[in-house]
Image: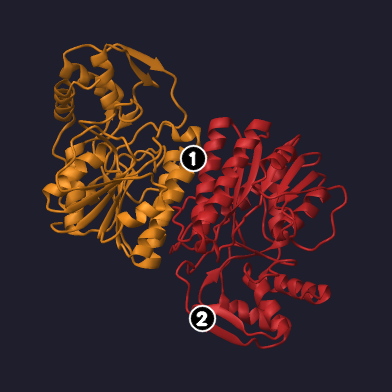
Chain colours: A orange, B red
Amino acid sequence: MSGKHILILGGHGFIGSHLTVALVAGGARVRVLDRAGGVPTAPVRGVDYRVAEFGDLATLAEALADIDLVIHLISTTVPGTANLDPVADIEGNLIGTVRLLQKMKEVGVGQLLFLSSGGTVYGDTDAVPIPEQHPLEPLSSYGIVKVAIEHYIGMHARQHGMRSLILRVSNPYGPRQGHLGVQGVIGTFFQRLRAGDPIKIWGDGQSVRDYLYIDDLTDCICTAIHREVSGVFNVGSGRGTSLIELLAIVARVTGSAPEVEFQPARGFDVRKVVLDITKARTTLGWTPQVGLPEGCQRYWDWLRRANVT
Amino acid sequence: MSGKHILILGGHGFIGSHLTVALVAGGARVRVLDRAGGVPTAPVRGVDYRVAEFGDLATLAEALADIDLVIHLISTTVPGTANLDPVADIEGNLIGTVRLLQKMKEVGVGQLLFLSSGGTVYGDTDAVPIPEQHPLEPLSSYGIVKVAIEHYIGMHARQHGMRSLILRVSNPYGPRQGHLGVQGVIGTFFQRLRAGDPIKIWGDGQSVRDYLYIDDLTDCICTAIHREVSGVFNVGSGRGTSLIELLAIVARVTGSAPEVEFQPARGFDVRKVVLDITKARTTLGWTPQVGLPEGCQRYWDWLRRANVT
């Protein structure tokens, strides 16, 4: 990875800000393109930060100059809200990514890493854990658009010789996530508990997710870049945790009993997602290191230290 | 089907014009919405023809009034050209269909029949024949957009109780198809041969397709509407024919030996598509009646009779 010139699209976000630190530490030259705002964190020394909307093609083209690899983390929507305006989801994310692919070809950038959504692309399945070759049957606009993006990346790679790596990430969590409460149930739980607000759960609390600590995710991405792999990989912990189990962990970590409000289930939420990470383990030699209780403790420590409000 | 009020979107096209005749004959009340132009054929008595672009939402909303079932046949692109401008493909077809679904919900139309593409949604597979549950791995923009449309229809059906029927049609052919030479190899072959032009084949002529005569397709659609089924069905002949075999049939039917020019294969063409039509056979009690030699003969008879140029 050392010396590689990498453009991170969406580098001001939760994943992007952690990844910027990890890539620079690994010896990469990093440029970040993102909209204004984002996670409040100190700039990383040596990083070339640029600010633009995803649809600003002129600035995007400039940012692609001399880049070896684009890491595409931009999402103009989140899983819970994309359904409310699917046209905006398609325009912002799908057309935005197709235009990115066209610009990459024009400028001559030959490598793309895209973070897809392991939690939504497979849909509601009884497969536990879910392997990469499972049919893609998304229930939500968020997942439908991610699948279409994966397909366009595959088409572009075949037609223009681009090397592509698609990581279907489960539910990443960790410091700096979820200030708005629209993304990341762990951040939301801890922050509501700290504020003394009741915790809302849609459904009966039995829905199972695969939570991955942010450092394990950035470690996986750095390893994949270092090994120059391509293809599609699930990236998760490989373990399932229900919301009820997660609540118990949160209670233990904070030493307090959360007040819970159960709300009707949302139609686009799938019941259970646990990713089969055998391919990432064997191909990359990567294994998640941070268990959920340990990761929750780290998140809680950060939350209190950072005094996030 | 008798008495049902049906809106055909794309009723001026090859499939739409045949379907209009068949539905009226079956006792349905039919309204047609399409752009200006289309297949030159006489209007069908009793049909309410309206002209508008797919993106004209006001006219679309008016056309949806009092409709029981929408049959969505509109495609603003064709398989061979969609890749040239994927953004236009997404905007015209995918966003157009999402807006249609939204309008159907607003107006209160509860049934949709969509013609998807059996030839492109599955991608390049060794499965022969291909069943409906095969993973969807489209290689072309045309197929990627069809898959995304299927997913949005499924989402809309689950969330709003709409009844949806998706027919993944193979390669339909028959009278009135393919004046422009961009869609339908059978029409193109016969018309070039009649004009004394050489026949162009991309690749080595071994690519296999599943050709379905138009009357068998309209028969399948009418049966499915009559039986009020929903879900996803492959609709094809269930038989594979290579281009070389097709050429031999064309030569027999016309009594002349075509001159052939072989051209390099196109990256987005799949090698072999034969649909498994077991589900349509058993659920609908439908079976294709017109074999390829017979269908080609009928096409050739029509072509000479109609004196198409």
Gap in angstroms between the C-alphas marked 2 and 1: 41 Å
The residue lying at 40 percent from left, 49 percent from top is: A56
The residue lying at 61 percent from left, 76 percent from top is: B246
Vertical position of residue A248 compared to residue B307: above or below:
above
Residue carrying label 2:
B263
SS for tag 1?
A: helix
Disc assigned to residue A108? none
Q: Quadrant of residue B250?
A: bottom right
Q: Residues within 10 Å of mark 2 (few under 14, many from 20)?
A: few
Mark 2 or 1, closer to the camera: 1
Q: What x and y, as percent, mark residue A183?
A: 33, 30
The residue lying at 16 percent from left, 33 percent from top is: A291
Amino acid at pointer 1: Ala
Image position of A215 (left or right of B148): left
Residue carrying label 1:
A88
Q: Quadrant of the C terminus of chain A?
A: top left
Q: What x and y, as percent, mark residue A275?
A: 29, 41
Q: Residues within 10 Å of mark 1 (few under 14, many from 20)?
A: some
Q: Quadrant of residue B172?
A: bottom right
Vertical position of residue A111 compared to residue B180: above or below:
above
Image position of B103 (left or right of A137): right
SS for tag 2?
A: strand
Amino acid at pointer 2: Gln
